[in-house]
Amino acid sequence: MSREFFRCVSFSEKHFTSSASVSLWAACCLRLPSATHFLQPVPSPHSNSSSLPRQLTTTPAQQPLSNTRANWMEAFYEDLRAADGSFKYFVGGEWRVSSSGKTVPVLNPSKSNQEAFRVQACTQDEVDEVFAVAATAQKAWAKTPLWKRAELLHKAAALLVENKDPIVEALVKEVAKGQKDSVTEVVRSGDLIKYTAEEGIRILNEGKLLAPDSFPGNDRNKMCLASKIPLGVVLCIPPFNYPVNLAVSKLAPALIAGNSVVMKPATQGCVAGTYMMQAFHAAGFPPGVVNMVTGRGSDIGDYLVTHPAVKCISFTGGDTGLSVSKKAGMVPLQMELGGKDACIVCEDADLALAAQHIVKGGFSYSGQRCTAVKVVMAHASIADALVDLVNEKVAKLSVGQPEDSADVTAVISASSADFIQGLVEDAQAKGAILCQEFKRNENLIWPVLVDKVIPTMRLAWEEPFGPVVPVIRVATDEEAIALCNQSKYGLQGCIFTTSLNKALLLSDALETGTVQINSAPARGPDHFPFQGIKDSGIGSQGITNSISLMCKTKTTVINLPQASFTMG
């Protein structure tokens, strides 16, 4: 279907000056229920009312809302599927089937790893074409006015949220994310895109004028103009666990800065990312500015990260990122990798608050979050009371299907479940106490608090990425800090204490990118800086930091024939 389907001819681009007008645009051009259900047609001052889209005068009673919405959704996404039902890849403004003739299965973790979808297995030649198209398109995109880039991002955000239903369904099926959390991820992603558009306008329109006479030995006979320019083609590699939010957190900053993007989603989470890409396409981004390849990392992964057209890599994932960083060469890297986020509970802590956040931080989305609580360091004097409080809350967690928004659902793969089980069995064999019986049904693992873990156990150091939280009992704050800092990771940590002085002292001592005080580790709000140290990452995320990373400074120096002073 032509992209003209997604355009609203009765509203010129100048009218998209607010999020409300963008929502109106999205509703009108997609003929979505919100246009007829909530809005009345308002004539443009530059056109008569007869030029408004006819669908704005349609009443909800003329057609059942659910059927109408389903039809519009189907029309919006109809180009994404090949004749065999597999999902296409995206290059140069077109959805295509790979010349390989092969596809890659996407499994449903909560349904015995049955096949849920199939995506294209792109070839290296197709990767070459994608990068060539992206590099060419970026030259023109860099000349696109900043307001226009922001406008298109606002449109993409509106389209993403308006058409979220298939994305939510894909998240439930391919990454076993709860229904409610899946909706939240898509809505949050729309907010992130809109915020990025506004932040880009604020920071990218500013440059610097430097005078030379502040440096010893120089007169005022030069002017240095410093500005921010895009890098080129940015390779974006989001993870399986937040395949929409952690995709747009890379795409939106790159695009507002004037870069083109090539996205390679994880296989699990790939379909949600494919649906998301359609929102950018339908928003009207020029062909080649936004692209997506799919396939096995073993076939095209190294080829992507070492490709000479890549000028920046933004990657979120596990230890694979260490390999990526070594192979990437001289390009800026934004790497958010694993973590062993520690929760230090001091003697003076509010134990009820700490228990609440340990359960929320350790078991939400089955512990499959980089910022999940991965280990609790509890003072021996309060450990028994804390463990009792945590166990009470663990007992109330629901375990089951993502469609039912269960608190704990299946982990992403059988191999992940095997790894988690291995960590628990190792700890139990070495004397740790399982506060709950270890239960597993295929990929579904019931939540377990593992008490009296000691440093000789694998669970003390390795990241389970599952619904398992170890408790290490410590005698002093210093012992807790020492154990935390021995980890190869340094993403986040948290400290529970009622003493502000203690909070600041321990935070300074903790070798992590972020420390939360009296709250579980978390990524966000999305404009907060987010970074890891040691093996947890390179560079800093957060909207402002991401925009800055995806630009470089260009200077023009004007040499004057003689010194010149203001008002001189």
Image (tube, rainbow, N blue to C red):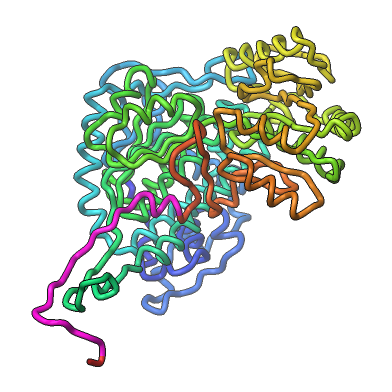
Taking the spot 37% from the left edge, 36% from the top edge, the residue there is: 263
Q: Which span of residues is magenta-colored?
A: 545-566
Which quadrant of the figure has residue 376?
A: top right
Q: Looking at the image, which is closer to me, 85 or 227?
A: 227
Taking the spot 81% from the left edge, 17% from the top edge, the residue there is: 434
Q: Quadrant of the C terminus?
A: bottom left
Left-right relation of 200 to 565:
right
Residue sticking out furthest to the top: 429
* Residue 302 pos. (x, y %): 32, 23
* Residue 280 pos. (x, y %): 40, 47
Q: Is residue 184 visible?
A: no
Residue sticking out furthest to the bottom: 567
- Residue 5 vertical position relative to residue 562 in the rendered view, above or below: above
- Residue 489 vertical position relative to residue 464 in the rendered view, above or below: below
Taking the spot 66% from the left edge, 24% from the top edge, the residue there is: 466
Q: Is residue 418 visible?
A: yes
Q: Looking at the image, which is closer to me, 148 or 45?
A: 148
* Residue 113 pos. (x, y %): 58, 15
Q: Looking at the image, which is closer to me, 529 or 91?
A: 529
* Residue 339 pos. (x, y %): 58, 32
Left-right relation of 257 to 542:
left
Left-right relation of 38 to 425:
left
Q: Is residue 320 found inside the magenta-colored segment of the image? A: no
Q: Quadrant of the N terminus?
A: top left
Q: Looking at the image, which is closer to me, 422 or 296?
A: 422
Left-right relation of 306 to 271:
left
Q: Is residue 549 found inside the magenta-colored segment of the image? A: yes
